[in-house]
Image (spheres, grey):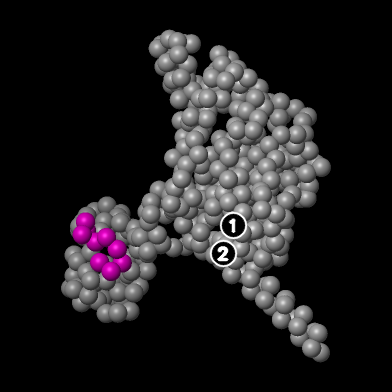
Amino acid sequence: MKTAMDSLRKYILKTEIEPLLKNLSEELANSILNSMFKNPYTTGPHFSLKENIKNLEDIGKALDSSGANADLSANVKSLFWITQDLQLPSELKSLFNKREKVAILIGAGVSRLLGMPGWNQLAEKAIDYLYERGKINYFEKERIVHETLDAKQKLTIFHDFIDKSQEDAKDFFTKQLQEKTVENNPYEILANFPCAKLTTNIDDEFYNALNKKLSSQSNGQPSNQPAVPPTGSQAKQEYNNFSEDLFPLNSNTIYQIHGSLKEDFPNTILTMRDYIKSYFEESGLRRFLTRLFHEYTVIFIGYGLEEFQILEHIISKERRHYAVIGNYFTDVNLFEVRRKYYSNLNIDIFAYYLDFSGHQRLVEVLKSWLAEINMEVNKISYDLQREIEEADAG
């Protein structure tokens, strides 16, 4: 597992480093470029680090050999060590500090970190399953896979052949969404966030992580949970019959708004018919979500653009929400395009950088954010306790 110390960019825009070199002698500037980059005289916009430079220490050695002084070396190294995404955004810090109503809504991108397929991959596997069992022929399989772009449409076709009430359907999803054991489970980090916890995933990984956390607390084991007392050793799970009666939301409950594979698979939301019934017609889930977006600040984690098309007409315009998305550090233009799109939904976006370990970087980001939240919450609790003690003493 890569960590923050591995957050080293392997290339850099010339315009980023040139300001640090402009007041140097030509000889020293060339020495620095030659010591670090494999293409110091390229006409392109980027410099690329030499293959033997793997970390900040290697950059430091190269700069030392070039004759750069300590201050210049520190400034150059700062261009390559990227940790901005590991810092809790001020907007989120304020929400947790003020203990406002916050909810995290978790999508398939998080379960993918456990080795599960994303919805597009899952949908294609479902079509392959139909072909393998003789429900469709090869020509039909290829046409469906390559011409049907939406995962929900593919899953609708799957359930046209194999209804959700049939054991074969549940067996297929159970096999694809098997429980996983990983060294750095993102759900075990998310379970410690002091807020409401919701997911559109039908696997039980979020619930398992929260249940593990609460069980360890009740057994007296150490936990990095902020100062939010548990309601018991067993996590709760809501997966159907959503209504406004569930408010206020409980931070020790996982709200599986698309249902649970294990507990009630026939009523999970997978097909186009399911989505239309739940999101576009009058339903308990629609009323539940409308109130959620009205009362809570929602942080989306693990979602792509396509999922927001469903929520676009439900998300409250009265409250600002947030989304955490993967983006490459230098891909500023794409990030701005995305920012404008999300802004139309009243959503601000924060990036985690894919340059270093792909989407696995999200785990390090969540871990770092949680540490900051814990520190801030515990500081506030300490200050409040001190004020009470001073007032009693007075």
Toward the front, the furthest residue is 219
Q: Secondary structure at mark 2?
A: loop
54 in the magenta segment: yes
Can residue 364 be seen here? The reply is: yes
**Tag 2: residue type?**
Pro
Residue drawn at x 19%, y 66% as measured from the top left: 35
Tell me the magenta residue range: 50-58
Residue 222: mark in rendering: 2
Residue nearest the observer in this picture, 73 or 197 = 197
Residue 46: mark in rendering: none
* Relative horizontal placement of residue 279, taking residue 334 as reference (left or right): right
Tell whether label 2 touches label 1 (CB within 8 Å).
Answer: yes
**Tag 1: residue type?**
Ser
Magenta segment main secondary structure: loop
Circle 1 residue: 216
Q: Position of residue 28 (x, y in %)?
A: 20, 74
Residue drawn at x 61%, y 59% as measured from the top left: 219
Q: Secondary structure at mark 1?
A: helix
* Relative horizontal placement of residue 293, taking residue 165 as reference (left or right): right
Image quadrant in which the C terminus is located: bottom right
